[in-house]
């Protein structure tokens, strides 16, 4: 997801080097994002949503392949970020606008533009952060997760046959909410570097199989629910930490008194 990061050893990626395999996976992600835009323009919203999800899958693969094969590069990082802006910024914004936001006129396309702008800001902030210092958490909602939320919302609403003004208003608030979360300081779990001991590898494998089975039952519903849970995890964890911090401060003041 996002850029081909530095290796764990902290070495600077090779300047000017272009590695074929990770760049090919990134290109497939870009192609899927572009196809999502074309499909949305032609009114095939289901195909557009699926293409965005496929783009997210290949975006997760390119960085992992680059790290496993030792082919991280500055070129790959920059190329990945540019592709992410198209696949997870422009594509979901166009999909949301043409699907539900267009009737709102100026408010609709401004919401779509805000989403694209915050995606660009999110990517710029990510690329300027020290990615080697915190690999377990993201600051702000990752762009692929935000794009996936819009895509799965389309699939969910079509599956449940939701229509009307309630669906349109829900998407309008969702786009604004996702735009805020991407540039917020809420912390989100990163699955880029899963660390499991040998004793827990088997349990992790079983959990992955169960997740695949659950998703395969009704993917339009389960993907939406999983995405919603991840989206809400940042604000909920942040609120929990504020409550715990407030209780500790009150207890400390009582001890002083």
Image: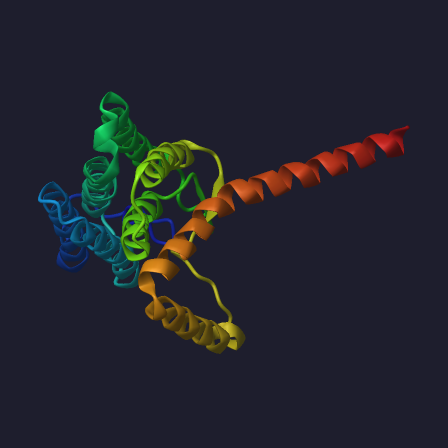
As drawn, which residue projects farthest toward the right?
257
Residue 113 in view: no
Q: Residue at x 19, y 40 (%)?
A: 86
Q: Residue furthest front?
A: 164
Q: Residue 123 versus residue 145: which sits nearer the camera?
A: 145
Question: Relative to 10, is 120 above or below?
Answer: above
Q: Residue furthest top?
A: 106
Image height of 202 relative to 87, above or below: below
Q: Residue at x 42, y 38 (%)?
A: 140
Hey, which quadrant is residue 130 in on the image?
A: top left
Q: Can residue 244 be seen here?
A: yes
Coordinates of residue 133 in the picture (x, y in percent): 46, 45
User: For the point 14% across and 55% down, which residue is it?
Assistant: 28
Where is residue 119? Give x, y as percent: 30, 35
Q: Quadrant of residue 142?
A: top left
Give how far across and how far down residue 154 sits, in percent.
28, 49
- Residue 9 vs residue 19, the one in the foreground: 19
Q: Position of residue 25 (x, y in %)?
A: 17, 57
Q: Is residue 190 left or right of residue 121?
A: right
- In the rendered image, the quadrant that contains the C terminus is top right
Instruction: State whether residue 187 is above or below residue 210.
Output: above
């Amino acid at each position: 997801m996002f850029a081909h990061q530095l290796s764990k050893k902290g070495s600077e990626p090779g300047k000017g080097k272009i590695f074929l395999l990770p760049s090919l996976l990134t290109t497939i992600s870009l192609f899927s994002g572009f196809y999502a835009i074309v499909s949305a323009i032609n009114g095939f919203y289901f195909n557009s949503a699926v293409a965005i999800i496929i783009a997210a899958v290949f975006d997760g693969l390119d960085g992992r392949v680059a790290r496993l094969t030792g082919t991280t590069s500055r070129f790959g990082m920059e190329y990945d970020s540019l592709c992410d802006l198209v696949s997870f910024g422009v594509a979901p914004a166009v999909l949301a606008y043409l699907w539900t936001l267009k009737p709102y006129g100026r408010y609709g396309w401004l919401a779509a533009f805000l989403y694209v702008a915050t995606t660009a800001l999110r990517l710029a902030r990510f690329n300027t952060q020290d990615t080697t210092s915190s690999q377990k958490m993201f600051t702000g909602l990752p762009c692929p997760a935000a794009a996936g939320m819009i895509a799965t919302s389309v699939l969910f609403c079509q599956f449940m046959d939701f229509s009307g003004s309630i669906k349109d208003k829900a998407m309008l608030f969702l786009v604004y909410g996702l735009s805020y979360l991407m540039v917020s300081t809420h912390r989100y779990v990163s699955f880029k570097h899963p660390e499991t001991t040998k004793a827990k590898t088997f349990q992790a494998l079983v959990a992955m199989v169960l997740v695949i089975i659950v998703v395969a039952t009704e993917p339009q519903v389960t993907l939406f629910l999983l995405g919603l849970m991840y989206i809400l995890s940042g604000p909920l964890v942040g609120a929990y930490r504020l409550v715990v911090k407030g209780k500790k401060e009150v207890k400390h003041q009582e001890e002083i008194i």
